[in-house]
Image (spheres, grey):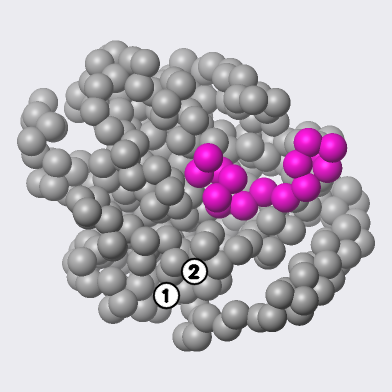
Amino acid sequence: MDSKQPKGNQKNSSNINAQWGKANYWKWGKFYCHWKVLGEEGKRAIVFLHGFGASSSHWRFNANYFAKRGFRVYAIDLIGFGESEQPGPSKIKKLDNCFWAIQVAAFLEEIVYKKNSGKAILIGNSLGGLVAITTQALYPGLVSAVVAAPLPDPALAQSIQVSLPNWLEKFKNKLIHIFFNLIPLELLIPIILKTKLINIALQSAYFSSIKYDSELLEIVVKPALRNSAPRALRAMCIGMSTRKKTCTAPFLINKIETTQNQPQILIAWGRKDNFVPLSIGKKVINQFPWIKFFIFETTGHCPHDESPSDFNQYVLNWLRTNLRESIQKQ
């Protein structure tokens, strides 16, 4: 387990912002997906996966850094987020990390590998970290390394995984469906977005003050103001609450551990994370000591955005050390 004291909030927004890269849309089955790309074709691919409520724009302080150091950088808006489709019940009844992993795998096969050689590197924040781990577990032939910063999953906090009888599991899932369908998200979301509640919620994800970061507020608020946002959020709540055991982080990491060629995995955590306590990360490492673990001392839930200079440098050095056969120093 490593940790270090970040040098500070070394953000430089003079030539880097949420509009980085070239924006594209991709038709995946019956869904449309938004994604961005930056860097030369043919270079080693990095795919950034955003966290809950965020989008590809949240990698505003990271994309240029890695593109300038010889990577082809991609970022995708997961279904339900950003500018990607926010589907209703007629298209999909629930969204979970296994569904998003299928989306990422299709993106790698249909978009990324047409322009690049070698397996991709997945770097995810929060929910994106869980999706990255899920993609690695389900599609090991597509991914060479995973960075999850951090790795959230309620199943990681449970000391014992309890298997319910089939009838009771179905009953529980039915109650969850009823509960989230009764919550008036169409009324609650606008109230949250149009009051100071959204600022309070955002600040809780950061250790440093974000009072004057209007761009961050726009990254989160703009997609949530779409008319389709409540139905997508409902699908996520239902999906993540009714997942099968095979979609939970403990099961997925166990699956990865038994693969023939064990991949490189880095889990990073902010010591000041108020959303997912550091104790969860330490528990993961105690159970899976082969995974590399790193702590950012004065950082919250979004180390890539709050302490980008330290995050970028540490991840780059880790990649060069562990994938040195295919990454050349620029």
Residue situated in front as seen by the camera: 304 or 288? 288
Write down the residue under mark 2.
Answer: 276
From this viewpoint, is residue 106 visible?
yes
Residue 102 in the image: state x and y as whole percent: 53, 40
Q: Which amino acid is tagged 1?
A: Ile
Q: Which amino acid is tagged 2?
A: Val
Relative horizontal placement of residue 96, taking residue 63 as reference (left or right): right
Relative horizontal placement of residue 76, taking residue 229 as reference (left or right): left
Residue 217 colored magenta? no
Q: Secondary structure at mark 1?
A: helix
Residue 91 colored magenta? yes
Which of the labelled discs sits on residue 222, or is there none?
none
- Location of the N terminus by quadrant is bottom left
Residue 291 in the image: state x and y as whole percent: 24, 63
Which of the labelled discs sits on residue 280, or is there none?
1
Callout 1: 10 Å neighbours few (<14), some, many (20+)?
Answer: some
Q: CA distance from mark 2 to mark 1?
A: 7 Å
**Quadrant in the rendering for residue 289:** bottom left
Q: Are marks 2 and 1 in contact (CB under 8 Å)?
A: yes
